[in-house]
Amino acid sequence: MGVGSGTGRHGGHPVSRVRTAPWLRVAPAVFLLAWGGNHFTPLLHVYEEIGHYSPWQANLLLGMYVFGLIPGLLVAAAVSDRYGRRPVLVAGLASGALGSILLACGLESMGLLSVGRLLAGLGVGAAMSVGASWIKELSSPPHEARAPDGAGARRPSLTLTLGFALGAGVTGSLAQWGPAPAQTPYAVHLALTVLAALPLLRAPETRGTAMLTPASGAEAPASTAGPWWQDLRVPSVGHRRFTRIVLPAAPWVFAASGVAYAVVPAVVAPNLGEWATLYATVMTVLTLGCGAAVQPFVAGIDRRTRGRALSIGLALMSAGMLLAVVAGILRAPAFALLVGVVLGSAYGITVVSGLAHVQAIAAPGDLAGLTGIFYAVAYSGFLLPTLLAALLPVSPYPASLAVVALACLGCLAVVATSLARLRREAGPGHPQPEG
């Protein structure tokens, strides 16, 4: 919240006008879109039990929204650069709302559920590329003159993480104890989505032809020459810092969360009985809660380690994958919660530091596009649980997770080496970029 500089008079006393920080007008929509993307996770057991779907069908529905997410990330970014952030994010919010309606009505229809998940993915894609870029832009001059260090990377990431976590927590609780577990969670999400649209309509525009006038201090609108799909090109994607540092780390962002709250609950499920849904909910909230808790400290970690936050995130990621191997052997629900703590913390550090690198690389016209590519690559890791489940007939979870841990260690070596080279090229007196 910010305090307006104007004062009024009421009874002879000055009255301060309180003004909502511009980025807080966008944050509720981004939060609810993330909520809609992840609140399906704790319902997997519900669909298997009352919807009579097989495990592979439930997991297919879980991953289905990736097929909406990736075009949502890339196309929404290009369109928003040209026509503005607001109309695209409003469309994303409408897509997420329609997705919840179809999911609420589709318990007995695999087709409706698939389309609902795809629409939810489109909404999350808009939130991650357009919403994250918009929050970053509103966290800097002229919209906010005194934003804290790292706010442009931390605020969108934290908003998304809290949406993922609280959405899963509320949905899992409603499914465990509330009426109509396959309908009520979606009704709650739909009502909150309508409320989130109200402040979004009043958020300042930062891109496209509808943005503020040049006299207001905003940058000039992007060119509208040629067809919009030409804007899908993102020149910054070839930057060495992106290809050698960001890309090797990005898939592990959501591979971590996928292993923590999709694979680990399945590993310990035989020892959970009727509490499988509640345990999956707790694991999801714990993982993402730890990810949210660590994010405000990432900029400080990066400064104190001279730009090594991304390496620290991947090192913690590797440790978490090794703990997942142990959890797969022990099958002890209490021990498995430790996996959520470690992988959640690794997720939080990796997503913020990776996003900081992206924001440092991107030109103003590339920001939404490069952010979208980063999140598209990051979300490829969310398909890891499906791959591990498919390999179960030939490779049990502990064996597959051991290979995953080795692959993570290999990416850590690539990132750490590239960061060291970046520091050498920058020179001893050159300030190290956050990330």
Image (cartoon, rainbow, N blue to C red):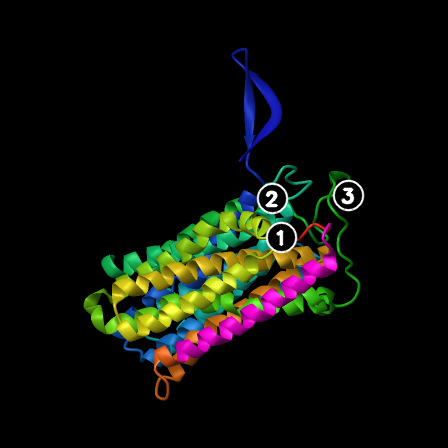
Q: Main secondary structure of the magenta part?
A: helix
Q: Mark 3 is on which residue type?
A: Pro
Identify residue for label 2. 149
In the image, taking residue 21 as reference, residue 269 lies left or right, namely left
Residue 54, located in which quarter of the rendered image?
A: bottom left
Circles 2 and 3: CB distance less than 8 Å?
Answer: no
From the image, which quarter does the C terminus lie in?
bottom right
- 174 versus 110 height, above or below: above
SS under mark 3: helix
**Residue 416 falls inside the magenta stretch:** yes
Furthest residue in direction front, as rendered: 428
N-terminal of the pair, mark 1 or mark 2, is 2
Identify residue for label 3. 214
N-terminal of the pair, mark 3 or mark 1, is 3
Mark 3 to mark 1 CA distance (whole Å):
30 Å
SS under mark 1: loop
Between 167 and 341, the residue placed more toward the observer is: 341
Residue 10 point in image, percent of width and height = 53, 15
Residue 207 point in image, percent of width and height = 69, 52
Residue 394 point in image, percent of width and height = 37, 88
Q: Mark 2 is on which residue type?
A: Asp
- Tag of residue 434: 1
Circles 1 and 2: CB distance less than 8 Å?
Answer: yes
Mark 2 to mark 3 CA distance (whole Å):
26 Å
Q: Residue at x 57, y 39 (%)?
A: 21
Residue 113, located in which quarter of the rendered image?
A: bottom left
Q: Residue at x 55, y 37 (%)?
A: 20
